[in-house]
Amino acid sequence: MALAGCRSTNPDAKPQSHRKARGPSVRSVVCLFDQKPWISADAAGDRDPEGIRYRVFLDSGQTRGALQKGKFHIEMYQIGKNEKGELERTLVSDWHYAVDEFPHVSAKLLGMGYLVQLRWAKKEVAGNEVEIITQFEDLDGNITRGATKRLRVPKYTS
């Protein structure tokens, strides 16, 4: 009996996991940011960034840089201090796009991936520290989260 493992006598019991029985199609999400990942897309022509670009590679565990069907869920938090001097994270932009909306890129070591280019909602992001969180959701609803990336967005005075 000890070798049988855990069993339930309830035939309607479901596994206590947010993953489908088949498992996720992606094992890890790798995000590569250039030294200056900023997009300046302002009609006024100032040098302050209005967006960011970076590359995302999905590791299926079987092939390097596997292109998958699914969606990217990306959140950007602005990091600052509140009135009490405590660090505070405020969601300033979030994006939800099918992977098909991004062009493909290739990297020698990582295989095929996606070039993510995003514009944020608030001009006031320039000059602040932000955190970017990238998640991939496969067609079965399994979500794989990449590492959080913290960056300081430049603010130019000219």
Image (cartoon, helix red, strand yellow):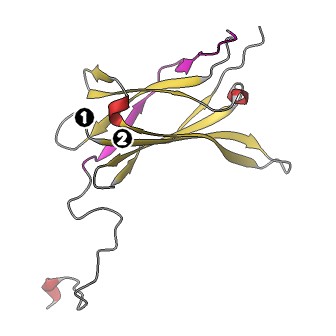
Q: Residue at x 29, y 74 (%)?
A: 15
Q: Residue at x 67, y 39 (%)?
A: 78
Indicate which disc, 1 or 2, sits on the residue closer to the N terminus.
2
Query: Residue 34: within the magenta?
Result: yes
Which residues are the magenta region?
25-44
Judging depth in this view, the residue of 87 and 60 nearest the camera is 60
**Visible in this render: residue 127?**
yes
Q: Please provide percent x and percent y for residue 18.
A: 36, 64
* Left or right side of 135 for 88: right
What crowding class fits label 2: few (fewer than 14 Cα within 10 Å), some (14-19), or many (20 or more)? some
Q: Main SS of the magenta segment? A: loop
* Left or right side of 148 for 123: right
Count of numbered circles in the view: 2
Q: Please provide percent x and percent y for residue 121.
A: 64, 32
Q: Is the residue 129 above or below the residue 37 in the image?
A: below
**Visible in this render: residue 110?**
no
Q: Please provide percent x and percent y for residue 156.
A: 73, 14
Q: Please provide percent x and percent y for residue 158.
A: 77, 7
